[in-house]
Amino acid sequence: MQIWFHIDVNSAFLSWTALDLLNAGSHEDIREIPAIIGGDIHKRHGVVLAKSTSAKAFGIRTGEPVTDAYKKCPYLKNYPPNHHRYKAYSQKLMKLLGTYSPEIIQYSIDECFMRYILSEPAGDEQEIRRMSVSAAKEIKDRIRQELKFTVNIGISYNKLLAKMASDFEKPDKVHTLFPDEIRKKMWPLPAGELFMVGPSTADRLRLLGIKTIGDLACTDPEILTSHLKSHGKMIWEYANGIEGAEIDGRAKNENKGIGNMTTLSSDVSDKKEIFKILRELAEKVARRLRQSEVLAGLVCVEIKYYNFKSATHQTQLLTPSNGSSDLYQAACRLFEECWSGEPVRLLGIRTSKLCTAQEQQLNLFDMEKSEKMLKLDQALDAIRGRYGENAVVRGSRMKAEKLGWEQEIPDEDFNHMSRGKRHE
């Protein structure tokens, strides 16, 4: 019998920033006041990455624009993220957990799965459960005492239920969710609280009369499949506590996409200027794909308008590619297909369905074209790698830079915001 713990840091970015400030001599713990970790409001970019309990009381949500958060709480305090320091805190946590188990699977910078190893022979199943809860409380308390931040720990026989359990009441809690507890603890929750059920899926489920996880679990899976395809079958399994697919960090990393987003310092309505920005984004994303030695099979463009309304559009490439030109052409086509004509404040390009060159199938024409473009891209990569990012720039960039656009959110923040139950 395997026992899994899911360990999740409570408001990780905010907690770790609070510790840095306290260590630097601050007399105020930002975990105890209305505070957030987010972008620079004066540069018009950034979203709420983490919030304190006091900020949550004002209705502030993770992922919403910082400007909206200030409208809800004018005296809110905002602090920038420090990913270098966050990685250091994460490493300390993993090192401490490593003293309890040799099997630690990191799911994101602030959460992981850990297989519980019995420290002594146990009797029946209830005794094993009791010992696992006792061990989890010891780990939780040690993290609070030694590392000075708190975690929630969920416990079950599989990783799915352990992760669901860790999302119960917070902070600084230990919760179990064993199969015989599913009906009482998980089924009464709204369907949107289930892992891998995001807002759009929750809306579609409501149209089917499915309001709770219990409703979902008791629905005929064929009905769900007819409306949601394979995703419907997966969330039906999850609602019944069945971990039909691996949800650990390894599966997550294999499916990870690569992308870049940019917020403009002033709204832009000129399509030519927008295309120049898309070209720069495409080149950055393509360069990172080449550095990772992967090809993208799918390209997605995201637009956020002046009024914060959003639009996304995606397409599957006929031939997977990491070429700058291929990504740029796809991005321009996607933009034209979904742009409403309204002023744009944010643009993004993301890629997914990644594969290696060995997995790619090309016809003769594609091979010749791909080889020529690859040599050009590799030459530019070599120049920029040796002499800096701006060693070679397109003439169009000179004008684009006057618009003041710059990268907004790195991939690790997207992962932090979208992981778990809100990810689709």
Image (tube, helix red, strand yellow):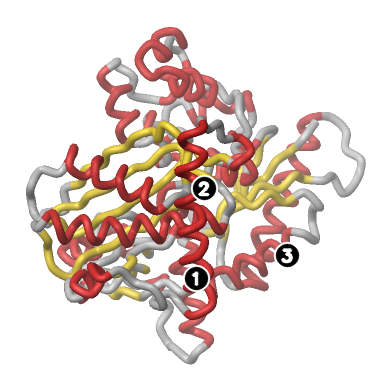
Q: Secondary structure at mark 1?
A: helix
Is 44 or 243 nearer to us in this picture? 44
Disc 3 versus disc 2: distance between alpha carbons?
48 Å
x 77%, y 49%: residue: 103
x 69%, y 65%: residue: 142
Q: Which residue is mark 1?
A: 83
Is 305 or 169 nearer to us in this picture? 305
Is 255 or 402 nearer to us in this picture? 402
x 68%, y 54%: residue: 137
Q: Position of residue 118 (x, y in %)?
A: 84, 44
| Quarter location, residue 146 | bottom right
Disc 2 versus disc 1: distance between alpha carbons?
37 Å
Of badges 3 and 2, nearer the viewer stands: 2
Q: Amino acid at mark 1?
A: His
- Asked if marks 2 and 1 touch (Cβ < 8 Å), the reply is no
Q: Position of residue 161 (x, y in %)?
A: 59, 34
x 13%, y 54%: residue: 271
Of badges 1 and 3, nearer the viewer stands: 1
Dot 1 crowding, Cα within 10 Å, few <14, some 14–19, many 20+: some
- Asked if marks 1 and 3 touch (Cβ < 8 Å), the reply is no
Is 234 placed above or below 59 here? above
Can the viewer see residue 167?
no
- Asked if marks 3 and 2 touch (Cβ < 8 Å), the reply is no
Q: Which residue is mark 2?
A: 371
Q: Secondary structure at mark 2?
A: helix
Q: Position of residue 357 (x, y in %)?
A: 59, 42
Q: Which residue is mark 3?
A: 96
Total numbered badges shown on the rendered structure: 3
Q: Is residue 385 left or right of residue 229?
A: right
Q: Position of residue 421 (x, y in %)?
A: 44, 39
Q: Amino acid at mark 2?
A: Glu
